[in-house]
C-alpha cells in the first residue's frame, strides 16, 4: 500500500460519512416527514428507539420479535433469577406451579422407536378405559407414532390437550392380536411433589420431596400422616436435587414442626419493607425427630426449610452445602399473556443469614459456580469450604452458622465415588440399565405383579439370574464383559437394576427402598437417626461438621 493510498482512505471514509449525513438532511427537508405526528413523550430511550425503528426503518420489520429478543438481554444486567416468560411458555409454567395439567394420565418411555407405557396413574383417564403398563402406543388420532423416530416431546404434544377433549389411542398389547383402540377423555393429571413416603424401619419414616408447588403441602401432610400412622417417631426428609418453587408450600411445611411464634424467615428489599414469617400454633409434628438431607442442587424453598430447621435447632441437616439461592421473585402478568418474574427481595433465615451466592461476575459464572465447587473438591472434603467471619451467625441454641452461599449441613457426607469404573460408565452412558430394566419388567410383569413392596421384589430378584442376563444384554449392545470392572461396580449395577425393575412394576414405592442400599447419604442419615442424635448434643459429636470457628 503506497503513501498516497494511506492518506486517501481516511479522507474517503470521512467524505462517505458526511455524504450520508447530507443525504439524510436533504431527505428530511425535501421528502414527506416520516416521523410527523409521533409522540416523543416516552419516559425512556428504549421505547422511543423502538418507535423510530418501527416507523422509519428502511425495511419492513416486526418490532414485536425485536422486543421478545431484547427483554431477556435487558434482564441479564440484573440478577440470575429475574426472568421473562414468553406467552407461549406460560401454560407450562402455570402447570408446574399449580401441580397439574390435562392429559391422559400415563408415564411413557420411547425405546427402540416404540412408545411404551411405564405407569398408568391410578384413577386417571387412561386407567378408567383400561390402558395397562406394558402397552405400546402406536397411534394417536390419525398420527402413527411407532417406527417413525418419534420424540418424547412430540408424543407429549399429541397426548396432552384441554380438559374434557377426546383423543383416540391405538395400542398393541402382549397376548392380543391386532390393535386395541381406546377413546380417552383428557382430564387433570397431578404433577406430584412428594415422590414417596415409606417406613425405613419400625420408627423411622422417609419422605422425598422433589419440588415445591401449590399442592406440595397437601401431599406432604398426607405422606407424614401415613408415616405417623405407621409408628414414625422420626422422619428423614430428602430435599436433594430439589430446586425449590412455591414459597407458600414450604412455609406451611415448616409451620408443622415449630412452636407458635418461632421465626421461619424474613424477606426484605429496596422497595419492600421487611416482612417476617413466624410459626402459628399448628405444630402437628412437634414431637417427631427431623433429619433433613440436602446437596449442591437443593435450592430456594429447600434452603428455606433446611435453614429454618437448623437455625431453630429443630432438625439435623445432613449432606453437602446447598446451592445458595436466596432471592424472592414476584410474577407480574403482562398484557399479551407473558409475564415478568422479578426479584423483589432477599430472604433471610431466622438467624439473619442471607444464603444467596454471589452473582457479581455475571449470570454465566453464577451458574458455573457449581462446577467450580467440584473443581475445588468441595463435594469430597468439607474443609475445602471457606467462610467469611463477617457472615458469622448463631442459631437459637448458640451454634455457629455462616451466610453468603448456601446452607452448610451439620453432618457433611461426600459424593460417593465407590463403584465407579470404565465398565460402569460405558453401561451408564448408553442407558443400558434403564432399558434392560424396562424390558425385564415387561417380560416378567405377571410374576412380578404379585409383589406389593420393593423389599419383596428385591428378595425375589436375588433368586433370579438377572445380573448374568444383563451382562449378556450389555455385550449385545457393544459393552464387553469386564471382570475387573464388574468386581468394582457389580453391587452398584445389580442394585440399580433391581430398583428400576421395581419402579417399572409398582412405581416409587418399589424404587426407593431398594436404591437406599447404595445411597451413602441416606445410609448416614439412618445411622445418625438410630444413634438418637438430637440437635442439643451434635456439637459434642466428632463427626459433626460445624463450620470453622
Image: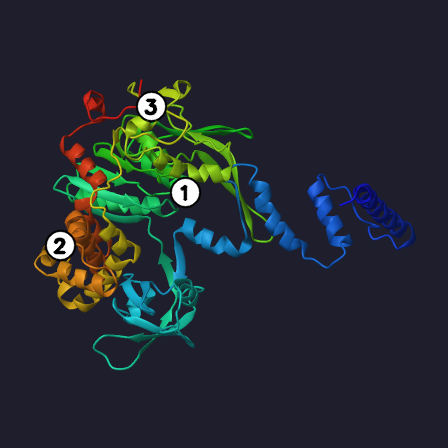
Residue where numbered disc 3 is placed: 401
Q: Residue at x 32, y 46 (%)?
A: 210
Mark 3 and mark 2 lie on one chain; the one further toward the N terminus is 3
Q: Nearer the viewer, residue 430 or 305?
A: 430
**Few, some or many C-alpha atoms within 10 Å of disc 3 (few <14, some 14-19, many ≥20)?**
many
Q: Is residue 80 visible?
A: no
**In the image, residue 150 above or below residue 334:** below
Q: CA distance from mark 3 to mark 1?
A: 25 Å
Q: Quadrant of residue 384?
A: top left
Q: Residue at x 25, y 46 (%)?
A: 223
SS label for mark 2? helix
Q: Quadrant of residue 225?
A: top left
Residue 448, how many percent across, how many down? Answer: 15, 63
Residue where numbered disc 1 is placed: 246
User: Where, quadrant-wise, is the C terminus in this rendering?
Assistant: top left
Residue where numbered disc 2 is placed: 458
Mark 3 and mark 1 lie on one chain; the one further toward the N terminus is 1
**In the image, residue 532 above or below residue 489:** above
Horizontal side of 74 relative to 454 (left or right) equals right
Q: Which mark is residue 182?
A: none
Residue 202, how many percent across, how many down? Answer: 12, 41
SS label for mark 1? loop
Q: Nearer the viewer, mark 1 or mark 2?
A: 2
Amino acid at each position: 500500500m503506497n503513501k498516497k493510498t494511506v492518506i486517501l482512505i481516511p479522507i474517503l471514509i470521512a467524505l462517505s460519512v458526511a455524504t450520508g449525513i447530507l443525504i439524510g438532511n436533504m431527505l428530511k427537508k425535501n421528502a414527506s416527514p416520516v416521523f410527523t405526528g409521533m409522540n416523543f413523550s416516552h419516559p425512556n430511550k428504549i421505547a422511543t428507539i423502538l418507535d423510530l425503528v418501527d416507523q422509519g426503518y428502511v425495511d419492513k420489520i416486526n418490532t414485536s420479535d425485536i422486543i421478545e429478543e431484547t427483554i431477556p438481554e435487558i434482564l441479564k444486567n440484573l440478577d440470575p433469577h429475574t426472568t421473562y416468560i414468553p406467552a407461549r411458555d406460560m401454560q407450562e409454567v402455570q402447570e408446574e406451579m399449580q401441580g397439574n395439567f390435562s392429559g391422559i394420565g400415563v408415564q411413557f418411555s420411547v425405546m427402540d422407536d416404540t412408545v411404551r407405557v411405564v405407569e398408568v396413574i391410578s384413577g386417571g383417564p387412561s386407567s378408567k378405559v383400561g390402558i395397562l403398563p406394558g402397552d405400546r402406543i402406536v397411534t394417536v388420532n390419525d398420527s402413527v407414532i411407532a417406527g417413525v423416530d418419534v420424540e418424547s416431546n412430540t408424543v407429549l404434544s399429541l397426548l396432552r390437550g384441554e380438559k374434557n377433549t377426546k383423543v383416540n389411542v391405538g395400542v398393541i398389547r402382549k397376548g392380543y392380536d391386532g390393535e386395541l383402540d381406546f377413546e380417552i377423555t383428557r382430564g387433570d393429571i397431578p404433577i406430584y411433589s412428594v415422590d414417596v413416603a415409606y417406613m425405613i424401619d419400625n420408627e423411622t419414616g422417609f419422605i422425598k420431596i422433589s419440588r415445591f408447588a401449590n399442592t406440595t403441602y397437601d401431599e406432604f401432610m398426607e405422606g407424614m400422616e401415613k408415616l405417623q400412622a405407621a409408628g414414625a417417631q422420626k422422619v428423614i426428609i430428602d430435599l436433594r436435587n430439589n430446586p425449590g418453587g412455591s414459597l407458600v408450600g414450604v412455609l406451611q411445611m415448616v409451620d408443622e414442626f415449630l412452636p407458635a411464634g418461632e421465626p421461619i424467615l424474613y424477606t426484605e428489599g429496596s422497595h419492600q419493607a421487611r416482612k417476617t414469617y413466624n410459626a402459628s400454633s399448628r405444630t402437628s409434628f412437634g414431637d417427631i425427630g427431623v433429619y433433613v438431607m440436602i446437596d449442591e442442587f437443593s435450592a430456594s424453598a429447600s434452603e428455606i426449610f433446611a435453614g429454618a430447621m437448623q437455625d431453630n435447632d429443630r432438625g439435623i441437616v445432613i449432606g453437602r452445602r446447598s446451592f445458595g439461592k436466596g432471592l424472592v421473585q414476584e410474577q407480574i402478568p403482562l398484557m399479551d399473556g407473558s409475564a415478568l418474574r422479578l426479584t423483589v427481595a432477599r430472604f433471610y433465615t431466622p438467624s439473619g443469614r442471607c444464603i444467596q451466592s454471589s452473582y457479581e461476575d455475571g449470570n454465566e459464572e453464577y451458574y458455573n459456580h457449581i462446577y467450580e465447587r467440584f473443581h475445588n473438591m468441595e463435594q469430597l472434603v468439607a474443609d475445602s469450604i471457606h467462610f467469611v467471619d463477617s457472615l458469622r451467625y448463631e442459631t437459637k441454641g448458640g451454634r455457629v452458622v455462616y451466610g453468603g452461599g448456601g446452607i452448610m449441613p451439620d453432618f457433611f457426607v461426600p459424593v460417593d465415588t465407590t463403584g465407579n469404573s470404565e465398565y460402569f460408565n460405558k453401561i451408564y452412558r448408553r442407558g443400558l440399565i434403564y432399558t434392560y430394566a424396562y424390558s425385564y419388567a415387561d417380560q416378567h410383569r405377571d410374576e412380578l405383579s404379585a409383589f406389593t413392596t420393593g423389599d419383596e421384589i428385591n428378595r425375589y430378584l436375588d433368586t433370579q439370574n438377572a445380573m448374568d442376563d444383563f451382562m449378556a444384554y450389555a455385550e449385545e449392545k457393544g459393552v464387553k464383559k469386564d471382570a475387573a470392572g464388574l468386581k468394582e461396580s457389580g453391587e452398584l449395577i445389580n442394585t440399580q437394576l433391581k430398583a428400576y425393575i421395581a419402579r417399572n412394576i409398582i412405581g416409587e414405592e418399589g424404587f426407593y427402598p431398594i436404591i437406599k442400599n447404595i445411597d451413602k447419604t441416606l445410609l448416614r442419615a439412618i445411622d445418625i437417626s438410630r444413634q438418637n442424635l438430637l440437635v442439643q448434643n451434635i456439637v459434642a459429636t466428632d463427626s459433626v461438621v460445624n463450620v470453622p470457628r
